[in-house]
């Protein structure tokens, strides 16, 4: 169902997105065209002034000094237009490249205009301007500006009217440039009273270019635009300029122009024609800009309509999708809630009840707590969801049954081990009693030594049986009524390990341990000593220290070995097991770590304040420290043994213990916060 709903929604959104994208692109094109048309009109305004300056400069170099005031005013207008083009990127780059020598050209024109016309052939040698070179400089600059006119590259899309208007504007700019170039060129010719060199050929090329541009303009221009252009060419000034062109054609053979071919009159007539053409050019540019603005407005309106339609469609589809998804999410949410309830509550509660329920002889294990009618529907919804709910109930039933079987099996295993442990403990106790009687009756030293070895083996067997009972949580402590001296506790622990001859009881300060704790403390120390003997070289002793820490009001036993030690990660995991209070099932733990679990549970059974911690030994190895709180210590009644003459250096052990405990507490705090 989700796929059936999602596919049409995605298709509709894709279509709406493509439509909106198309309108956005049209809007961008329209805005870009409007901006570029405006820039084009500004470029043509600069070109118009440069064309005027070109013509006046050419006439001035031809000898018409009366052009000087008009040239000065035109130069100011050119400078103003150039200043307005700053920051226009490509246009500014063209200006810097082609008009960089403008000031030098102007200065050369001014110097050249002061010389007599008869010396114009020597102007290159005197540093003044040459008429042909000056004309070429201005023409190249104008052509470069026309080449970067954005109208020639504007993307007009599918709007034919705007495309034709821009094409007509482009062709009219080319025709106007030809007319202005002809004005400036013949201005110098009339001032010099004739053509020189290849000037007549240049004149004919200029006229041919104008005629071709006007022909192309007719193809793109509208009727009003063609009428405006024809009107500009029918004025009296335009007719007068045509007459001057005819006179210039008559001097094609290099003869002198007639005296009535006045350069000033020619300039005035052609300037009027160029201004009229510029007015037509501005009119067409305004038409193109208005068209671009209209297209931009239409694109904005269309984009807004498409956005509103797209938003409406999206909202409608979202509503339909939400309605369809709610019909799925509600039963799925109920299904997930039921699954969470099974995983977080029902299954753990059933397992805990199975583990905690007492079982009499011959009584079967408690069954899993499942509904009486497994076929009853858990929730309503589609048929597929109902099938999933039924399957979930079957999974729940199977999981509960397996959990019940596993819990029962684990409890039976634990009880079996506890039963075996109690039997072994009773047998070992009877064996020790028998060995003790035999030791009292035996007089042969060799036989007595063998009995002592047998007694030691039985003692170790008793400790193993008691360790098994500690792990299953059913071992009562060995009855000890009277408090015992600390040295006696250590000696009792040493007697329960295999390689007891390698144990060095270095220093044990006088202390008395309360009677109910003696057996557990001795057992705990025996496990730590056994661990040190196992993981240290056979020729290295394991030291046992004992001292009273007045700062914490505790008595500390330290078991120090110089063996292989442990990595930080292993040591951290081992310290976690030493703090175990029974949460970790010993049946699931690796067998090589059972001693750690025994120590942890013995420490937990001794009560609050008992700490066991592992830390590195100076020079290599591992040290284990057992700290007993004051409540487990009995008041001293004299020393039962003579303390050694020198107290051991226990400060390093104590400092290491405190540092290790601090690190463990820090890691515990960080784990809880994360």
Image: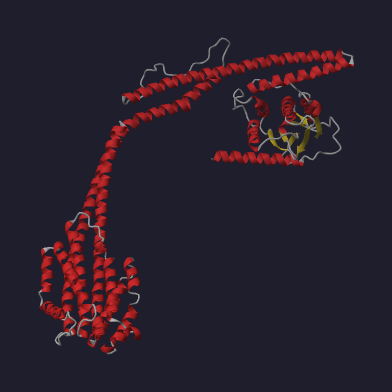
Q: Vertically, is 664 above or below 265?
A: above
- Residue at x-position 13% and y-position 70%: 229
Q: Quadrant of residue 437?
A: top right
Quadrant occupied by the C terminus? top right
Residue 138 in the image: x percent, y percent? 28, 75
Residue nearer the viewer, 369 or 533: 533
Tell whether 415 sits left or right of 92. right
- Residue at x-position 32% and y-position 80%: 105
- Residue at x-position 29% and y-position 81%: 130
Tell whether 283 sits left or right of 510. left
- Residue 526 visible within the image: yes
Residue nearer the viewer, 184 or 332: 184
Q: Vertically, is 66 above or below 358?
A: below
Q: Quadrant of residue 266?
A: bottom left
Q: Vertically, is 508 above or below 251?
A: above
**Colouring scheme, one of rainbow, by chain, secondary structure, one colour:** secondary structure
Residue nearer the viewer, 160 or 33: 160
Residue 629 in the image: x percent, y percent? 71, 34
Residue 318 in the image: x percent, y percent? 29, 40
Q: Residue furthest top?
A: 362
- Residue 478 visible within the image: no
- Residue at x-position 26% and y-position 52%: 24
Tell whether 562 sits left or right of 338. right
Q: Quadrant of residue 416?
A: top right
Residue 636 in the image: x percent, y percent? 80, 32
């Amino acid at each position: 169902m989700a796929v059936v709903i999602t596919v049409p929604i995605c298709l509709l959104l894709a279509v709406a997105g493509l439509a909106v994208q198309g309108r956005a692109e049209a809007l961008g094109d329209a805005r870009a065209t409007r901006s570029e048309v405006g820039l084009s009109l500004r470029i043509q305004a600069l070109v118009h002034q440069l064309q005027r300056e070109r013509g006046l400069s050419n006439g001035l170099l031809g000898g018409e000094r009366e052009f000087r005031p008009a040239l000065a005013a035109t130069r100011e207008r050119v400078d103003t237009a150039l200043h307005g083009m700053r920051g226009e990127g490509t246009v500014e780059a063209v200006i810097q490249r082609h008009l960089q020598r403008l000031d030098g050209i102007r200065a050369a024109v001014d110097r050249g205009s002061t010389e007599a016309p008869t010396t114009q052939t020597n102007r290159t040698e005197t540093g003044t301007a040459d008429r042909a070179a000056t004309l070429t400089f201005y023409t190249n600059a104008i052509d470069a500006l026309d080449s970067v006119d954005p109208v020639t590259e504007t993307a007009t899309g599918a709007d034919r009217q705007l495309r034709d208007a821009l094409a007509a504007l482009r062709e009219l700019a080319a025709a106007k440039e030809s007319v202005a170039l002809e004005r400036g060129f013949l201005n110098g010719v009339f001032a010099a009273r004739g053509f020189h060199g290849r000037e007549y050929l240049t004149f004919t090329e200029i006229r041919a270019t104008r005629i071709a541009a006007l022909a192309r303009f007719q193809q793109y221009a509208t009727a009003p635009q063609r009428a405006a252009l024809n009107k500009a060419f029918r004025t009296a000034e335009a007719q007068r300029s045509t007459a001057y062109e005819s006179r210039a054609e008559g001097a094609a053979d290099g003869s002198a122009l007639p005296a009535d071919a006045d350069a000033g009159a020619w300039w005035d007539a052609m300037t009027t024609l160029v201004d009229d053409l510029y007015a037509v050019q501005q009119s067409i540019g305004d038409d193109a800009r208005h068209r671009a603005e209209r297209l931009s407005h239409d694109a904005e309106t269309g984009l807004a309509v498409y956005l509103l339609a797209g938003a409406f469609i999206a909202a409608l589809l979202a509503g339909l999708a939400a309605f369809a998804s709610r019909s799925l999410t509600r039963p799925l949410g109920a299904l997930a809630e039921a699954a969470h309830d099974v995983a977080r509550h029902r299954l753990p509660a059933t397992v805990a009840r199975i583990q905690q329920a007492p079982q009499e002889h011959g009584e079967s294990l408690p069954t899993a707590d499942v509904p009486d009618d497994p076929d009853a529907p858990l929730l309503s919804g589609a048929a597929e969801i109902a099938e999933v709910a039924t399957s979930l109930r079957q999974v729940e039933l199977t999981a509960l049954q397996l959990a019940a079987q596993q819990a029962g099996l684990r409890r039976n295993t634990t009880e079996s081990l506890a039963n075996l442990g109690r039997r072994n403990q009773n047998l070992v106790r009877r064996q020790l009693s028998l060995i003790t009687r035999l030791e009292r009756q035996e007089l042969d030293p060799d036989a007595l030594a063998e009995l002592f070895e047998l007694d030691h083996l039985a003692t170790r067997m008793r400790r193993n049986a008691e360790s098994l009972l500690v792990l299953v949580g059913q071992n009562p402590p060995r009855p000890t009524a009277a408090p015992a001296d600390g040295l006696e506790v250590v000696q009792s622990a040493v007697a329960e390990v295999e390689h007891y001859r390698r144990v060095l009881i270095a220093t044990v300060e006088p202390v008395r341990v309360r009677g109910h704790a003696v057996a557990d403390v001795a057992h705990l120390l025996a496990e730590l000593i056994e661990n040190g003997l196992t993981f240290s070289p056979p020729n290295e002793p394991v030291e046992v220290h004992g001292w009273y820490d007045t700062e914490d009001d505790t008595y500390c036993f330290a078991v120090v070995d110089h063996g292989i030690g442990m990595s930080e990660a292993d040591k951290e995991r081992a310290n976690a097991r030493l703090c175990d209070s029974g949460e970790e099932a010993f049946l699931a733990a690796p067998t090589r770590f059972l001693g750690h679990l025994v120590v942890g549970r013995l420490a937990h059974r001794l009560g609050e304040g008992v700490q066991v911690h592992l830390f590195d030994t100076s020079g290599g190895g591992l040290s284990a420290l057992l700290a007993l709180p004051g409540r487990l210590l009995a008041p001293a009644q004299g020393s039962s043994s003579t303390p050694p003459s020198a107290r051991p250096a226990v400060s390093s052990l104590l400092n290491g213990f405190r540092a290790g405990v601090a690190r463990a507490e820090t890691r515990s705090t960080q784990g809880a916060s994360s």
